[in-house]
Amino acid sequence: MKLPRTAAGWTIAVFGVLALVMGAVGLLWPEAMLRSLGFEVPASRAPGDHTGTFLLASSMASFNMGVYYLLATATEWRAFYRFTVVFRLVTFTVFSIAVLSDIAPDRFFGVAAWEGVGAVATAVGLWWDTRRAASAGGVAAGGDAAPTAADPSGGDGSGAGGSAPAVDAVR
């Protein structure tokens, strides 16, 4: 897989790798994941306690999400980047409320903070990439320009002919 070509791409790639790794840890060593989040790990679970099932589902979702984020990075799918900013801020809000309402342990706020910081980092990366491309005479705001004869690289201003365009891969 190629390295990300933009600042926003790097933020998405980092989150993707971490989501993939954390999903794998949850699948392979669920007790470690529970402890890291501040949850109890009793010697045995009561009948009807489906913590393991929920952790399995959450870990699989995290693993899959990591793959999606890495695919978005590989294709420089900027619409996906923008989408994640909004929904990671929603996730930050919901997880923060869960901690403040004593639904989740205090250490779970680390997950909320990670989502919030990640959303802001991606938003800043998108802003930076757009500003950089505009100052270089490259892509218009948002990075959604089509390749031109003058810039066959996909409009990202890199001039790297034959490389994947820095535009939305899926329309």
Image (cartoon, rainbow, N blue to C red):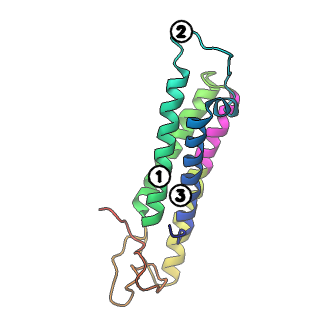
Q: Which of these two is toward me, 3 or 122? A: 3
Q: Are marks 1 and 2 in contact (CB under 8 Å)?
A: no
Kindly identify which residue carries mark 3.
12
State which tag comes first along the sequence, 3 or 2: 3
Kindly identify which residue carries mark 2.
47
State which tag comes first along the sequence, 1 or 2: 2
Q: Which mark is residue 67?
A: 1
Q: Which of these two is toward me, 100 or 111? A: 111
Q: Which of these two is toward me, 33 or 37? A: 33
The stretch of residues the image draws in magenta is 106-117
Q: Could you tell me which secondary element the residue under label 1 belongs to?
A: helix
Q: Nearer the viewer, mark 3 or mark 2?
A: 2
Q: Residues within 10 Å of mark 3 (few under 14, many from 20)?
A: many
Amino acid bearing label 2? Pro
Q: Is residue 107 magenta?
A: yes
Q: Residue at x 53, y 44 (%)?
A: 89
